[in-house]
Image (cartoon, grey):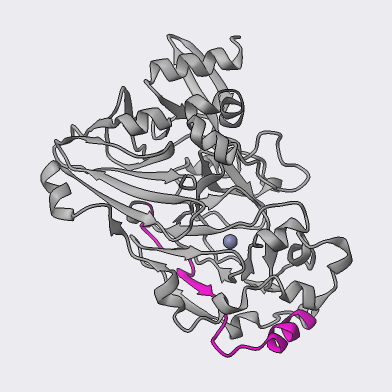
Amino acid sequence: MANSSEVVERALEQGEGIFRLFPNWVPRSFCIPGKRIKLHPDDYYAFGAHRGGIDERWFASTTKADNGPETLPDEGLSYIYFKDGRKEEKVLLKEAIDIMGNDILGTDVMKKFGGWLMFSKFFDNMEPLPHHLHHDDETAAHVGAMGKPESYFFPAQLNNHGGWFPYTFFGLNPGTTKDEVRKCLEDWNKGDNGILYLSRAYKLKPGTGWDVPPGILHAPGSLLTYEPQRCSDVFAMFQSLVWDVPTPWELLVKNVPEEYKNDLDFIISLINWDLNVDPDFYHNRFAEPKPVKPVEEMRTEGYEEFWISYKSSDFSAKELRVFPGSTVTIKDKEAYGLITIEGHGQFGSLSIDAPSLIRFGEMTSDELFVTQKAAREGITITNPSENTMLVMLKHFGPEL
Ligand SMILES: [Zn+2]
């Protein structure tokens, strides 16, 4: 068994600055899998039925899942996968960045940020999630954590059905008072605490997305969602009953200091009031894809690229579509992770394809990580298909 730095060096060399990542599945005991995540139908309970079904796949993750006492030591963490002849090696992306961050993310990025501060995931639920928020830096600091912004994009390729409720409640109705929210917290043990009466739902549209800064209440709907986010796992659930399943008070105050766990004023102070009651919520938070340069110019070169997450300063994401029969060279400023969602082709020195069925524990060719150097030099991508588009989603950390 080679040591980690040797493996990473050889993987870097073999892939010319591009790594493969091993599929990274995460179960959730409180969710119902939407079964659009390409896992074999027999494999949804591969962690054991008591852990819940698999409804998430995490990408380019150096963040461990916070999934209760039975969380595995490496749950949620992405592995670099390297194959040399018949020998297979795996190294945690986190470990690789710890030992060779300068070569992977770049010296300027390591100096400013000290590591890789985002990850992305697919979440794939049949039912909507409880109305909840993620703390900002200030309120997360009380429990020694960082705030958590996130954003959503709904790939059409993975949304052949919308699940049971493809609508997301966001924020609070303009004019909502803190007393009304306080009443919901007081009513926690009476069944439905009615928090959704204070909010409004938006119909989710495949091929578009939303920006969700910290402190905004949201009850994610049931589309399969690509979710770039900052690497933090703080949350507070404000809805006491979801699809007739009670939410324990503990999930409201999980990331609240001990002395404030029953302090309703403190709990309400987690809410970013202005952002929640913003009368222009839709215009400020909805994210229509934006071309990275004039569309006609890109089309004549054989591709289209869009910003799909662009309202946060902590991460961003793009969708790249290479047309059938085209070869293009694409440059980016920084290192990024990538997931292929349609078609097949050549990405630099590595082949990629979007599988239609994945067995739990098996390797795929759909996920990569591109070093800063390779991204800046440009990657030559070929789509050899006569008819099918080659489509990738690319996730980036904060800008320098
Ligand atoms: Zn959330």
Confirm whether the magenta stretch covers residue 226.
Answer: no
> Along the line of sight, which residue is nearer the eye, 234 or 27?
234
Is 8 left or right of 255, judged from the image as shown? left
Q: Which residue: 51% across, 30% down?
A: 107
Residue 341 visible? The answer is: yes
Confirm whether the magenta stretch covers residue 168.
Answer: yes
Q: Which quadrant of the view contains residue 185?
A: bottom right
Work out which quarter of the rendered image holds the N terminus and state it. Answer: top right
> Along the line of sight, which residue is nearer the eye, 92 or 220?
92
Q: Which residue: 83% across, 61% down?
A: 257
Q: Is residue 208 above or below residue 383?
A: below
Magenta span = 158-186
Q: Quadrant of ligand 1?
A: bottom right
Residue 171 visible? The answer is: no
Q: Is residue 271 above or below residue 136?
A: below
Q: Which residue: 66% across, 73% down?
A: 271
Q: Is residue 202 above or below residue 26?
A: below
> Along the line of sight, which residue is nearer the eye, 207 or 160?
207
Image x and y of residue 118, in percent: 54, 45
